[in-house]
Image: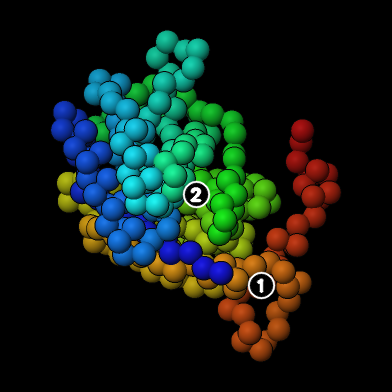
Amino acid sequence: MSVTLAVVQPRTRVGAEEEINLKEACRYIDEAARQGAQLVLFPETYPGPWTEKYRYDPLEALAAQARASGVYVVAGTTAPVAGTPDGYHIVCLFLGPDGALLGKYRRTCPRGPYIYKGGPLWDVNYTEADDLPVWETPFATIGINICSEVYVPELQRILALKGAEIILLPAGWVVDFNENWLTLVRARAIENLVFTATCHNLIGENEGMAFVASPERVLAESREEGLLLVELDLARLRELRRVRPKMSGTHEFTTIPGVLGFRRPEVFRKNLPE
């Protein structure tokens, strides 16, 4: 079994014109579906809104386009925190091919306000959440983390232990350390036996970093604006998870299979304080 993932790297508008992102996002969903994608990933906070000042709700338009195109969509926004006067979550919406909202991932790490308050791109009172959901689809179980959460490997390990086979890691805007960032994205694929994918917004002169990895190799990468389509071989992934850990020396695998079985939770409990 396989699934085709479309990673989108858009030319992103921020400020008074950012609602144009929503129209562009719908165009990308349509284009990705026409090229055979079943799952479409957008960067963090795309199509927005990015700030408290310029507010619009992207859900209805994205849901309508997901339904029209018959694809799963992961898109970014900010959303008010229930029960607070001014708090906002950094959110990924997960939409089904029927347009239904399957769920939301709200960023958990680090604690707010981080980079989001009063910055040149975001301007919201970011508030962290606590839940790490996964979603089962007909082709795979999917988890989501956001941007520099890739630097918190415990998060991706939790998703993998909850069954995630694809972990999507949409980023906002990275300019200074793309190479290290992509190294971590690949490492998370290797150590958790998952597919990982990332992309970010093209703003100003920054280069893209669309990137998809399997536990065994880099599958695709692009610095260009637009779509990057990749076929994910889930049968191979499940074989890697099914086999007991071994270093065979036969070139059967280009990673160590079964590494989730390396865990000894009793060692963690003994050595980490409650």
* x then y, percent, for residue 229: 36, 65
What residue is rendered at 24% in x and 49% in y? 27
Q: Secondary structure at mark 1?
A: helix
- Foreground residue among 36 and 126: 36
What residue is rendered at 80% in x and 55% in y? 264
* x then y, percent, for residue 116: 36, 29
What residue is rendered at 56% in x and 52% in y? 137
- Determine whether label 2 and label 1 are within 8 Å by CB: no
Residue for badge 2: 150
219 versus 209 height, above or below: below
Looking at the image, the residue that sits furthest to the bottom is 250
* Quarter holding residue 115: top left
* x then y, percent, for residue 121: 26, 34
Query: Counting other residues with Cα less than 10 Å from the Cα at mark 2, is it few (<14), some (14-19), or many (20 or more)?
Result: many
* x then y, percent, for residue 19: 21, 33
Residue type (three-letter) at the residue carrying disc 1: Glu
- Mark found first going from the N terminus, 2 or 1: 2
What residue is rendered at 48% in x and 64% in y? 3
Is residue 148 left or right of 254 when viewed as pictured? left
Residue for badge 1: 239
